[in-house]
Image (tube, helix red, strand yellow):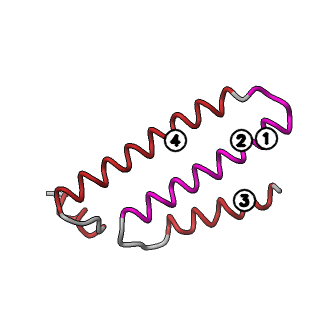
Amino acid sequence: MLMFFFIMFFCGVWVFSSNHKHLLVVLLSLEFIVLVIYMIINYYLCFFSFELFFVVIFLTFSVCEGALGLSILVSMIRSFGNDYFYNYNMLQC
């Protein structure tokens, strides 16, 4: 089971590190990585019968990270009209 989690994690890291031209693909791969880390932590805590308070805190931070990413995406689309990565060069005045 743990090997399955690591394969999922490295697939998410591979998609994140690949050269993509859209910001939305990168944000989705980051959310996938966070979801896999959540499953690993939940599996670990349930296996050793610990309390699951940390899982709630982790989910809160991951939701905040997702909302921040979406707000950056919306801001970039409103400013430049698309979500291509080549627009970041224009931001470096």
Q: Is there a contact, CB below 8 Å, between mark 2 and mark 1?
A: yes
Distance (Cα) linking label 3 and label 4: 19 Å
Tell me where residue 41 appears, x and y as whole percent: 71, 41
Query: Which residue position is annotated with label 3?
Result: 6
Q: Amino acid at mark 3?
A: Phe
Of the numbered discs 3 and 1, the one sitting upstream in the chain is 3
List the residue tagged with mark 1. 44
Q: Residues within 10 Å of mark 4 (few under 14, many from 20)?
A: some
Is residue 31 rendered magenta in the image?
A: yes
SS label for mark 3? helix
Callout 1, which amino acid? Tyr
Crowding at mark 1 (Cα within 10 Å: few <14, some 14-19, many 20+): few
Look at the numbered discs 4 and 1 and tell me whether their residues touch, using CB distance below 8 Å.
Answer: no
**Front residue (pair 19, 73):** 73
In three-dimensional space, the C-alpha distance between marks 2 and 4, rounded to whole angstroms, equals 13 Å
Mark 2 highlights which residue? 41
Q: Quadrant of the C terminus?
A: bottom left
Residue segment shown in magenta = 23-51
